[in-house]
Amino acid sequence: MFPSLIELKKYSKKDMSNLQEYRMVLLGDCATQHLAQAIRGYGYVNKLKISLLDTDYDQIIAQVMDLTSELYQYHADATILCMCVEKLYERYCKTAVELRNQFGKTEYEKIARIWETLRRNQSGKILQFNFPEADDRCFGNFGNKMNISFIRQLRELNLLLMDGAAQHKDTYIIDISFLQNLYGRKTLHDEKLYYVAKMPFSMEVLPAIAHEIVTVASVFRSRFAKCIVLDLDNTLWGGVIGDDGLEGIQIGELGLGHAFYSFQLWLKELSRRGIVLAVCSKNDEEKAKEPFLKHPEMVLRLDDIAMFVANWEDKASNIRKIQKTLNLGMDSFVFLDDNPFERNLVKSMIPEITVPELPEDPAEYVTFLQEQNLFETINFSEADAERTRQYREEAQRISMQENYLSYEEYLNNLKMEGMAKAFDKFHIPRIAQLTQRSNQFNLRTIRYSEEQIAEIASNSDYLTLYFTLRDQFGDHGLVSVVIMKREENNYFVDTWLMSCRVLKRGMEEFVMNCMVLEAGKQGAECLIGEYKKTSKNAMVEHLYEEMGFETMPDERFRLRLKDYVPKQVSILRVES
Amino acid sequence: MTRAEILSKVNDIFHDVFDDDTIEVFETTTSDDVEDWDSLMHITLISEVEAEFNFKFQMKDVVGMKNVGEMLDIIEKSMK
């Protein structure tokens, strides 16, 4: 499933000068050189240039405690902490028996101190390996009934690492324990390699570990899945709805349908986590919708599908239509189809889309996809759970628009209401998330963490605004973020981003009106804007000019507040 | 499989591991004879041979093998 270690080593030597960089330092209490090569090579596979500093053997404390060490000089985006269960066990054996009931806690506290020292002295993320389970079996199964057993203390330690990571915003866990469950200890660990070379992992499993690390790094570089496009026949149910009819398709807890039932349960969980589901099927629309409406054992219902496309056109064109309507980057799409012909067609017509090669046996769909780890994330907010509903409401708006003669009439009939408020504690997670996710309508693409947003919110040098929008079809939630920084008599627009879902209905003008009003209340003379070009934000290149700003010699834009005439919009400003 | 066939497969493995098709190994080849054959590469070599011939070296073999010939001995033994 993953490239071999030899392939990864070759990739690690390729020219990556045109790839986006992610800098990492690898600290280990065991031998890490082969892992380092695997990570660099896997970066190439994911189109990331992973600049990785591999530190010498067993230097974790030395590197972390010495503020002049290579670690601190490297200014890494993330530090990987690789600690092996073999050395953990040796420490356990050296621990007095009467202290063993605290072993997990003591080991956690040592690790937490490392996290704290790193956080105090540099600003990168921490990727902490957890511990694969290795029981010494001195008590057999009875070890599960003793709180001083190694297996008990190890499991407690792993749990403490989870709780600790939830508290330490910059720490993320790399779940080696999960990998060992998947592949088995016999595959993950090669005893002779440990004794001969102090390598805790077999060569065979290194690509899988590198894959996990590079996947997390990719998410930090804002590359993650947002939408799954689903085929229907033999993907969501067994059989063909057009031929087998409602009674003939296999879905439910009896027989082979159980595999598809599990698959739908899992897809539903993904939608709860914020992944948008869409359907793209070669079928009559009415026939295709029947199971969603009438079959008692379907898990997914029409409400769970943001956009339902069933016709006889080619899937590549249909997927392009779905992408255009949902307005998400094609590189955030995953296409699931049991038919290799369809998969190859879509992959060759749309190279940016992710098309997993589903195994032939539907029984294996879920575990195969879980192993790919397509849905890694670095945050989660309540807005995520609402996402499919919001996209579905948007699709409804688009179909209503098709019935109106003039666009202006349509906008007026939406009965839009918008709120503009200063950042508050409740909205900080969503605001930070938007700065990390928004790529297209984003003037300067500055990514902020929750803590950074909290700091800005409480700093009187900044004027902050978040915007919400709703209409007769539903609530879009928080759709735009503005951060303005006071510079003498002016405000510099540090951040202006907007969700692409609400473009071209007057929101841009509404935001500008509010920005001018609020800046004016603070006695400012001008607004200064800047456009920082990226490969994804061409749509806002001329935004300031369109809003009436003048272009200055240094290529920034300036608007004198007293010259501004508020623009006519169909959005009513409300307070709550 | 004959000794010569095993040697030929091991030679292919050397090409892959060292990314160099010009390498030719013999029974008497040692790590001094192949550029880049250090302890790191040795681990990679060991793993590839294990995967190709579907057996596992013992700990003492990994450190004890003096030349390619001794490696072939161990591979042959695993096939009996």
Image (spheres, coloured by chain):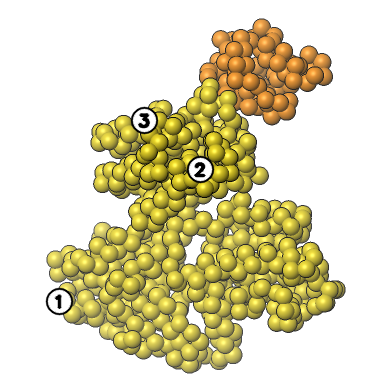
Chain colours: A yellow, B orange
Tell me the kind of residue under disc 2: Ile
Badge 2 marks a residue whose secondary structure is helix
Kind of residue at disc 3 = Gln
The residue carrying pointer 1 sits among few (fewer than 14), some (14 to 19) or many (20 or more) residues within 10 Å by Cα, namely: few
The residue at 27%/75% (across/down) is: A422
Q: Is residue A3 left or right of residue A496?
A: right
As helix, strand or loop, the secondary structure at mark 3 comes to loop
Q: Residue at 63%, 27% (x, y): give it.
A: B47
Tell me the crowding category of disc 3: few under 14, some 14 to 19, or many 20 or more residues within 10 angstroms, Cα based: some
Pinpoint the chain carrying mark 1.
Answer: A
Instruction: Locate residue A334 relative to residue A376 in the image: left or right.
Output: right
**Distance of mark 2 from mark 1, alpha carbons?**
65 Å
Residue A317 in sight from this viewpoint: no
Q: Amino acid at mark 1?
A: Gly
Are the residues tagged 1 and 3 within 8 Å (C-beta)? no
Query: Which residue is denoted by mark 2 in the rendering?
Result: A151
Q: Quadrant of the C terminus of chain A?
A: bottom left
Q: Residues within 10 Å of mark 2 (few under 14, many from 20)?
A: many
Point out the tag, 2 or 3, that comes first from the N-terminus: 3
For the residue labelled by badge 1, is the local secondary structure a helix, a strand or a loop?
loop
Q: Residue at x 65, y 73 (%)?
A: A300
Mark 1 vs mark 3: in front: 3
Q: Nearer the viewer, mark 2 or mark 3?
A: 2
Q: Position of residue B7 (x, y in %)?
A: 74, 16
Q: Which mark is residue A59?
A: 3
Q: Which residue is mark 1?
A: A523
